[in-house]
Amino acid sequence: MVNALGVCYTILGLLGASSAVQLVTRDVGISDVTSFPSAVLMINGNQTSCESALVDSKAGFIAASCLKYTSGTNVDDSATYELVVKAGGGAAAEKYAITQIDVHPAYNADTYVNNLAMVQFDQDSKVTFQNYIGIDPDEWNDHFFIRHSLSSTTSLTWNNIIAFSSTDTPSYCEEASRAYSENPDDFLCNYAASLSVYNNTCKVPYGVVFAAVQPDDLSLVAIHSHSAVYGPSMCSKQRKLHYYTVLRNYIGWAAGVLGRSVGGFAKDADYEFKPDQEYEMEKASSDEVEGVTLFSGDRYSQDPVDPKLAQVEPEPAQASESSSESPVESTSSKSPVEAASSQSSASPSSEESSPAAAQSPSAEVQPEPADESTSSAASPSSGASSPAAVSESTSPASPPAALTSDLPNLGAGAT
């Protein structure tokens, strides 16, 4: 089924059968991510930098490297795993116990190929939703890199969302990660990072990535996998690259684990996509890249904590949640339109944070190396935007990824 605008929404089942869902569409921008359900992983009561790409109101993807293990891929079940879930559109956050964890069988903790796990959580069913995973990369006009974080793990108060828009792929992505070089279509790669809520001298990658299919649609497409640093520390000023696992090829595996359908989105009504339950990336060499250190998992627990930001809970690098006239507060003091379309205003020679950044989580873009003078980071037409702080909307719209309905588990031959 196709709606009046020619947009096709499918529910992908265990065997690839589909059923169309008719939804309302509208123009999209970075601020529209506030209408989408989001989640942050907590371990033993502590906030992590790991986010979940929710597939629906009961389950989501997380990076497998965020979990604790006793040995190999045996998850440490003595740890307490929870998700803080915000349904979007100004809804109050809720904390749920994770009741089931399934690590992808081909996950490699050395190379970070297939760095995914499915988590299921104990939701009280007061709110139901279905997220749609983007399945046609050729339609993705823009990538919105998103960082969600909590200012209080007690009251479950959220910081403003930090967002960055870019379609650039830095030239060093292939060199720095063997997983990426063997599987370039399974990752997004970018230099952009945001300041840690626990240490303003350390940067953390974004958590999840949305793709805009302009002018009307937005879908969830990727989750952070690992980062490569030309140096020994994520808190250093050396070049860093951040890699995000593209989720489309793992829809079949997720549906098989959950025993129910997982939503997929393509605007092209003729686009054909059949999920593979046994999909896995090409194996990558575990040999180290000279001068490069790989990092993955929870950055908050691995990076040093600034005592000044840890003294008083619940305000680690507090960002205001109050409403403003504009849902997008650009760090370059531009209008919402300019913030979503302009080049990065980050200095090419410094990673020092501004005084304003010291008061709230902020994004930072690390430019291409000096020998790449023609890189898109210096070009006004590059497609990279200034980082923006996005406040929660109190009047949610109905983007494609936030559907309230009961969805069937589709079998072979369903239409």
Image (cartoon, rainbow, N blue to C red):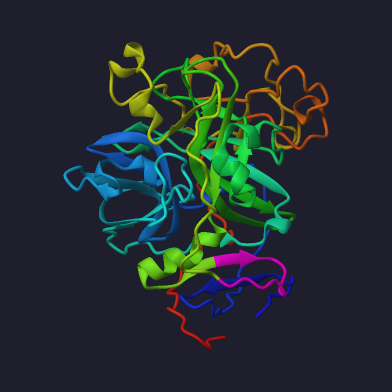
Name the residue nearer the viewer: 48 or 28: 48
In magenta segment, residue 313:
no
Indicate left or right for 140 with 414 as reference.
right
Q: Where 195 falls versus 218 (above or below)? A: above
* Percent position of residue 110, x then y: 42, 39
Q: Determine the residue positioned at 76% across, 31% down.
A: 342
Residue 80 visible in the displayed image: yes
In magenta segment, residue 269:
yes
* Percent position of residue 65, x then y: 38, 41
Indicate left or right for 26 with 40 as reference.
right
Q: Where 82 falls versus 352 (above or below)? A: below
**Which of the image's four quarters has the C terminus?**
bottom right
Name the residue nearer the viewer: 86 or 164: 164
Query: Residue most toward the bottom?
Result: 413
Residue 401 visible in the displayed image: no
Toward which corner of the image does residue 302 lie, by quadrant?
Answer: top left
Q: Main secondary structure of the magenta part?
A: loop
Indicate left or right for 363 with 298 as reference.
right
Q: Determine the residue positioned at 46% across, 38% down.
A: 148
Query: Residue most toward the left?
Result: 78
* Percent position of residue 156, x then y: 32, 38
User: Which residue range is magenta in the image?
Assistant: 264-274
Q: Determine the residue positioned at 33% across, 27% down.
A: 301
